[in-house]
Image: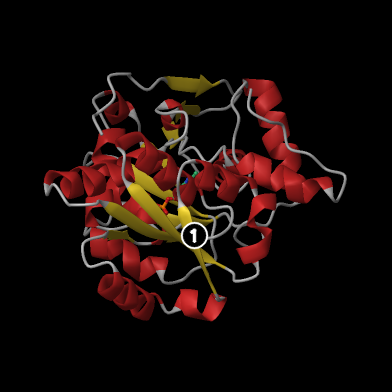
């Protein structure tokens, strides 16, 4: 993997408000390994390849709609490494071809192991077993969050991002917000929008960033992956109004909450707010497959 030459555009979201809101389009960095996934995998993969492993293999974990699983599969194909996905939910063993994320991953060469939810939760035992079975494999945790991932997030920040008072990102496993916190300038405040209801984030993120410059705000709208009618209206309305597609699980929930906070006067007048578009658009197809049964639809990519 090489650092892409493209410079990621920062786009203003035109508002009639006393603050200014912008998005950094990390989703445009790569058609399949988009957003924060590219940077979270960057040092993980480069360091592994640097060791010149024989028969390189990446093993990672995720749910049926995981952006991380899709990104690892695409990356494995791009750099010529075999990939194995440990997928949550034994019931998917027969049904995975109905799932767009897993179909995409399989088409990119990923092999699956489906495990029960309780076995999946016990990640330490699972990792131990996998290490015994594949001693030379690179085992990347769920969501890709580890020290290398946090280091990779540095590339989402540059001279241009220094001019903002607030840096915002959606939070799943916490690696991205930890990296932004670690590499932000001293005067910047970092806001993490938690799309999961997971209190352990409050202790996990400080393990990766000692700074006190970040605040975690709830944005899960009823639970991880839950897509309400209000979420659908918001994502569709945002795409129509500003021409920027959002995913329903991460960036859609973050942007909805940011606009609510602006209305509520959370940000001081004159603030410059930057939200990172961390990708996840592959999830729209899977969400639409579920929503279709209820007669609802999310706008596809623009
Ligand atoms: C689109 C998108 N945005 C944000 C995140 C949150 O990243 P993290 O798990 O590092 O908190 C994820 C999860 O990987 C994601 O897929």
Q: Does the image show residue 184?
A: no
The residue sitting at the right extreme is 295
> 35 or 91, which lies in front?
91
Q: Position of residue 183 (x, y in %)?
A: 22, 43
What's the colour scheme?
A: secondary structure
Query: Crowding at label 1, few (<14), some or many (≥20) Cα neighbours within 10 Å?
Result: some
Q: Quadrant of residue 282?
A: top right
**Residue 16 position by quadrant:** top right
Residue, far left: 51
Instruction: Please name whichever residue, 93 or 182, is drawn nearer the observer in this view of the structure.
Output: 93
Say if 225 sits above or below 105 in the image. Answer: below
- With 36 as the anchor, is 107 left or right in this view? right
Using the image as rendered, state which of residue 131 and residue 55 is in the foreground. Answer: 55
Q: Which residue is at a point 35% across and 81% down the rendered structure image? A: 125
Residue highlighted by disc 1: 112
Element carrying mark 1: strand
Residue at x 26%, y 75% (from the top left corner): 132
Work out which quarter of the rendered image holds the N terminus and state it: top left
Q: Residue 55: where, in percent of width, then height?
A: 24, 52
Residue found at x 53% / y 28%: 18
Residue at 49% across / 21% down in the picture?
12
Residue with the most extreme front position? 55
Residue 216 in view (yes/no): yes
Image quadrant where one finds the C terminus: top right
* Residue 213 screen position, x and y as percent: 29, 51
Pinpoint residue 274: horizontal percent, then vertical percent.
42, 33
Looking at the image, residue 9 lies above or below residue 36: above
Q: Count the numbered circles shown.
A: 1
299 horizontally vs 90: left or right:
right
């Amino acid at each position: 993997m090489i650092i892409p030459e493209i410079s990621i555009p920062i786009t203003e979201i035109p508002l009639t408000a006393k603050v200014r809101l912008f998005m950094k389009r990390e989703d445009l960095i790569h058609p399949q390994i988009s957003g924060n996934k590219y940077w979270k995998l960057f040092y993980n993969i480069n360091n592994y390849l640097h060791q010149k492993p024989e028969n390189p293999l990446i093993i990672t974990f995720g749910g049926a709609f995981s952006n991380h699983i899709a990104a690892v599969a695409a990356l494995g194909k791009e750099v010529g490494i075999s990939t194995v996905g440990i997928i949550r939910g034994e019931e998917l063993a027969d049904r995975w071809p109905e799932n767009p994320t897993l179909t995409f991953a399989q088409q990119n060469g990923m092999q699956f192991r489906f495990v029960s939810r309780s076995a999946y939760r016990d990640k330490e035992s699972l990792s131990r077993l996998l290490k015994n079975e594949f001693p030379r494999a690179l085992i990347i945790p769920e969501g890709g969050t580890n020290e290398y991932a946090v280091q990779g997030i540095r590339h989402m920040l540059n001279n241009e991002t220094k001019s903002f008072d607030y840096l915002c990102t959606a939070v799943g496993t916490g690696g991205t917000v930890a990296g932004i916190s670690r590499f932000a300038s001293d005067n910047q405040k970092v806001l993490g929008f938690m799309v999961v209801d997971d209190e352990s984030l409050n202790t996990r993120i400080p393990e990766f960033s000692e700074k006190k410059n970040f605040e975690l705000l709830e944005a899960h709208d009823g639970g991880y992956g839950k897509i309400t009618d209000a979420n659908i209206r918001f994502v569709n309305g945002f795409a129509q109004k500003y021409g920027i597609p959002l995913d329903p699980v991460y960036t859609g929930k973050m942007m909805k909450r940011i606009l609510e906070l602006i209305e509520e006067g959370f940000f001081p007048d004159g603030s410059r707010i930057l939200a990172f578009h961390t990708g996840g658009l592959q999830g729209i197809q899977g969400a639409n497959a579920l929503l279709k049964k209820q007669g609802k639809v999310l706008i596809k990519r623009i």
